[in-house]
Amino acid sequence: MTVVLMFVSLFALMLMRVPIAFALALSCIGYIALEGLPPVLLMHNMVNGMNSFPLLAIPFFILAGALMNSSGITSRIFAFARSIVGWMHGGLGHVNVGASIIFAGMSGAAVADAGGLGAIEIKAMRDAGYDDDFSVGVTAASSTIGPIIPPSLPLVIFGVMASVSIGDLFVAGIVPGLLMALALMIMVWFYARRRGYPTDTGFSVSNVGRTFVSAFLPLMTPVIIVGGIVSGAFTPTEAAVCAAAYALVLGVLVYRTITVRSFVRVSMETIETTASIMLIVGAATVFAWILTANQAAAQFADFMFSITDNRNAILLIIMLVVLIIGLFMETIAAISILVPVLLPISAEIGVDPVHLGVIIILNLMIGLLTPPVGMVLFVLSKVSGVPFGQCVRATMPFLVPLIGVLLLLTFVPALTLALPEYLNSN
């Protein structure tokens, strides 16, 4: 009964717009008080949840992405993507998706993609005569590629919570991220044909070469991160440190766009973002510990198997549960709470934890595009000046290809697992 009250208090606090970290912590405090448990359990579990070496990757990946944004690298990426796919019908829509693929290898966060590239992309599309609903919709949808293609902050959290190799999770996200991009580009092509959107620019080898040279050093960021992890040169945490150091060298010494003042501002933003994430992780760890202590995973498994023992049906139910949670809860908190409950069930039906991690993260990314949370939509509404309600309506059609990819990945695990299995066998 106290667990039920804990959930009720959590959702009540969320409806009152209490920050998710405090909502989780307060609901846990209520449970501990009602059960008469020692209050020190709260702090003990919070500290244990945050005391993890892989979690050190989070502030450095955040810092790397922020430095890339501040150093003007996003405009170089956009220009390079424009030279490659701008010749297609609806060219800037394809550029939007292509730039997100490239930026995904630097930021690891959907909100960073929407905030960093979003302003550039939407302005360029408006100037070219594209409708606001199309511009906002494709920008929002393409930003979800960021947490799937490595590096990925949500995959780091999942790896820590599930005790799964973060390197394997990073490699497993490459093919799904490219499939998402392909699905979105098909959607862009459909819109372009239907609305008569023009090509953006003619294809020119010299233009591709020029923009590639301009963007070459930023493009090396994902090569350093993924290449270093796959080759065993360094761990994901060390890769995050290298990425931050590399971004700092580019901004300070190469492009000379980062000043002492901008570096201090970026550092403070990184500290603030990291602190909020770590508070969520700590509070969610306590919440997950309470669920585990009350055998919530076993009870949920019994409930699932009482409905059906069909593997595909159980996977569909799991995905539906994650989707509903993602509509209301911030990504990091959702991962921390869902993993202890869903991991045992998925293991029982033979789902690889790496596969589970990728499809859960993609599922939760769809939640970033839907109200009431919809963090990406709030960011794009701010940078574009488009009302939030209009952003929601504009993004809805682009959920179709993303959900299609999610279903494909859910039922064809080889698309996720083939690459890490191949690399591990060689």
Image (cartoon, rainbow, N blue to C red):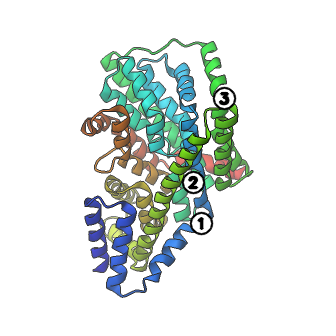
Looking at the rendering, which quadrant does residue 237 occupy?
Answer: bottom right
The residue furthest front is: 261
Q: Amino acid at mark 3?
A: Phe
Given this view, does label 3 or label 2 mark the residue nearer the observer? 2
Identify whether 300 is placed above or below 99.
below
- Viewport quadrant of the N terminus: bottom left
Helix, strand or loop for disc 2: helix
Residue under the point 55% across and 59% down: 159
Helix, strand or loop for disc 3: helix
N-terminal-most mark, 3 or 2: 2
Is residue 303 among what the camera can see?
A: yes
Cα separation, mark 1 vs mark 3, equals 34 Å
Cα separation, mark 3 vs mark 2, equals 25 Å
Helix, strand or loop for disc 1: loop
Residue position marked by numbered label 1 in the rendering: 52
Q: Which mark is residue 216?
A: 3
Q: Percent from the top left, x then y, of residue 385? A: 32, 32
Q: Percent from the top left, x then y, of residue 345? A: 43, 66
Taking depth in this image into account, of 68 and 195 the one nearest to the observer is: 68
Q: Which mark is residue 148?
A: none
N-terminal-most mark, 2 or 1: 1
Looking at the rendering, which quadrant does residue 334 occupy?
Answer: bottom left
Q: Residues within 10 Å of mark 3 (few under 14, many from 20)?
A: some
Q: Amino acid at mark 2?
A: Pro
Q: Amino acid at mark 1?
A: Ser
N-terminal-most mark, 1 or 3: 1
Question: Is the C-beta separation of discs 2 and 1 under 8 Å?
Answer: no
Q: Which mark is residue 59?
A: 2
